[in-house]
Image (spheres, rainbow, N blue to C red):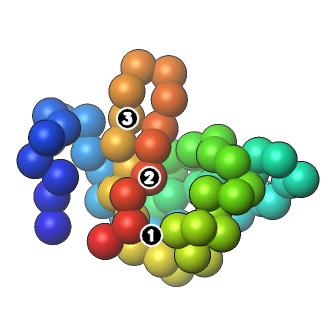
Amino acid sequence: MSIEAVNVRNQFRGRIREIITGPVVSEVEVETPMGIVTSVITTRSIRDLNLTVGSEVVALVKSTEVALAVL
């Protein structure tokens, strides 16, 4: 699956390797073929997206931020 509304060069498919949970924001490490991509997202988003270690995601990179999409 690919998210077509975003430039394909900015998409990295991978699996969540680690989640470091904080009270408001959390770090999500995604292992991709290009290396590790780290996203800082709200802890609420982790719950809402049901993200867990091993989940397959697409890291969407925009300048200084990394968004995640569930596959």
Residue 40: where, in percent of width, then height? 64, 42
Q: Is residue 7 visible?
A: yes
Name the residue that disc number 3 marks: 61
**Helix or strand or loop: what does disc 2 sit on?**
strand
Q: Is residue 44 depicted above or below 53 in this figure? A: above
Q: Which residue lies at the image location 44% right of the left edge and 52% below the top edge?
A: 68
Residue 53: where, in percent of width, then height? 60, 76
- Of callouts 2 and 3, the N-terminal one: 3
Q: Which mark is residue 68?
A: 2
- Of callouts 1 and 2, the N-terminal one: 1
> Mark 1, residues whose alpha carbon is within 10 Å: few (<14), some, or many (≥20)?
many
Dividing the image into 4 quarters, which one contains the C terminus?
Answer: bottom left
Q: How many marks?
A: 3
Residue 18: where, in percent of width, then height? 66, 66
Which one is closest to the eye, mark 1 or mark 2?
Answer: 2
**Helix or strand or loop: what does disc 3 sit on?**
strand
Residue 44: where, in percent of width, then height? 70, 58
- Label 1 – label 2 distance at C-alpha: 11 Å
Name the residue that disc number 1 marks: 15
| Amino acid on which disc 2 is placed | Leu
Q: Which residue lies at the image location 50% right of the left edge and 29% below the top edge?
A: 65
> Mark 2, residues whose alpha carbon is within 10 Å: few (<14), some, or many (≥20)?
many
* Pick the front one: 4 or 29: 4
- Label 3 – label 1 distance at C-alpha: 15 Å
